[in-house]
Amino acid sequence: MKNIITLMVVLLTIASCKVGPNYQEPEEKTPQTFRYTNNATDSIINLNWWELFKDPTLDTLIKTALKQNKNLLIAASRIEQARANVKFNKADMGPKIGAQAGAGVSNQFLGLPTDSNFESYSAAGTFNWELDFWGKFRRSTEAAKADMLGSFYGKRAIEIALISEVATNYFELLDYKARLAISESTLALRDSTLQIIQSRFDEGYTHIIDVNQAEIQKGITQASVPRFKRFIAFTEHNINLLLGKNMDSVVTIKSLLDYNMPDSIPTGIPSEILRRRPDILQTEQFYRAQNARIGVAQAMRFPSISLTGLLGVGSTDLSNLVSNGLGWSAGVSLLGPVFEWGKNARRVDIERELTKQYLLDYENTVLTALLEVDNSLIELSTYKEELIANEMKMKAARNAKTALLSRGYQLSGSD
């Protein structure tokens, strides 16, 4: 009982000893509100935001991309790799049990040659346990766990970016299809206008310059048709790549005029960004992993302590291998650096500087996230103002067209 208690005290002492700095969360330095916020307290991240458009085609494209996109599948594989790496590092904390066997023959006795041959046979089980006295293995496992969480957040970041890319390309596709339809209808009008002007020129009612101008207008519109066809093909190819599919056409059932835009988009508050954006959470976990590696480097400056054991049999005759009884040995070994010209100290310095870099990367990611939100808010605000102005301009143009038609004016395709 005394030996058991002594062993438990030793193990508890070992478990409590862990060199290196413990992780401290980075200090938050975010404003209370965004510069262009609408003072909303909710966030669009709470929603499957693409469902606001109520478009089954877009829903299908996004669901397919989330299942088949190659970058997303790679990210999922990295999570499994990181999970295995955690178990790989954690395995160093336990004892290692193995087996060994050997057979040999020699004509030497005490290093001198003889006239007889000596045979030897052995089989044994081995035991080796490097005690994690300085926390090297625990720090390494801590880093591996943080890397695993980082890979999980990395996958989430790819998912969010993927959804955005699919939606963006989808609406660009609708836009190019609408532009192509307008170009084709305009081309038909300008072709008719050119025929009318050509006929008037043939009868001597107009000048050749009018014909040339009509041909130029037709040429401009005619050149836009293949350009928009090209843009449509490129956008369809982008969508298929995001979906992890071969290049093919993308069937759409709606036009841009079929969508009702929401009156407002919830933005949340800056402090929520630090808790929700996966790119921020990912860089924070990478910083945490690197912080743990300082402890690994510091532990390598101290000697390693190992318990070793051997239990087996041996004989000079294979038939009597198990007849001589069991042999055993046990011991403690200590192995540590004495003088390596500062190599181990420099290793710690390297890890500390890397940790500073990861912290700066985290802080820069936070700033970038806040910048992106503020940029999006000002874009929403100014685009609404542009939309109001364009609607007023379109209304005035329609009124002018109605007035001209009521006075008997004939409008050409260019009008």
Image (spheres, helix red, strand yellow):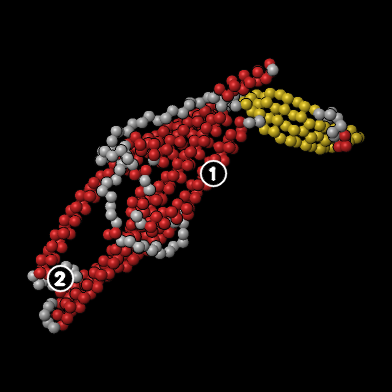
Q: Is residue 312 left or right of residue 232?
A: right
Neighbours of disc 1 within 10 Å: few (<14), some (14-19), many (20+): some
Secondary structure beneath dot 2 equals: loop
Residue 223 seen anywhere in this rendered image of the structure: no
Q: Position of residue 275 (x, y in %)?
A: 39, 36
Determine whether label 2 and label 1 are within 8 Å by CB.
no
As rendered, which of 203 and 79 lies closer to the eye?
Answer: 79
Q: Which residue is the extreme one toward the top?
A: 2
The quarter of the image holding the N terminus is: top right
* Circle on res. 80: 1
Task: Count the labels in the image.
Answer: 2
Residue 305 seen anywhere in this rendered image of the structure: yes
Between the C-alphas of marks 2 and 1, the distance is 66 Å
Q: Position of residue 187 (x, y in %)?
A: 25, 71
- Residue 299 sits in which quadrant? top right
| Vertical relation: 259 (above or below) 411 | above
Secondary structure beneath dot 1 equals: helix
- Residue 130 sits in which quadrant? top right
Q: Residue flagged by tag 1: what amino acid is it?
A: Glu
Q: Residue at x 16, y 67 (%)?
A: 415
* Circle on res. 411: 2
Neighbours of disc 2 within 10 Å: few (<14), some (14-19), many (20+): few
As rendered, which of 224 and 250 lies closer to the eye?
Answer: 250
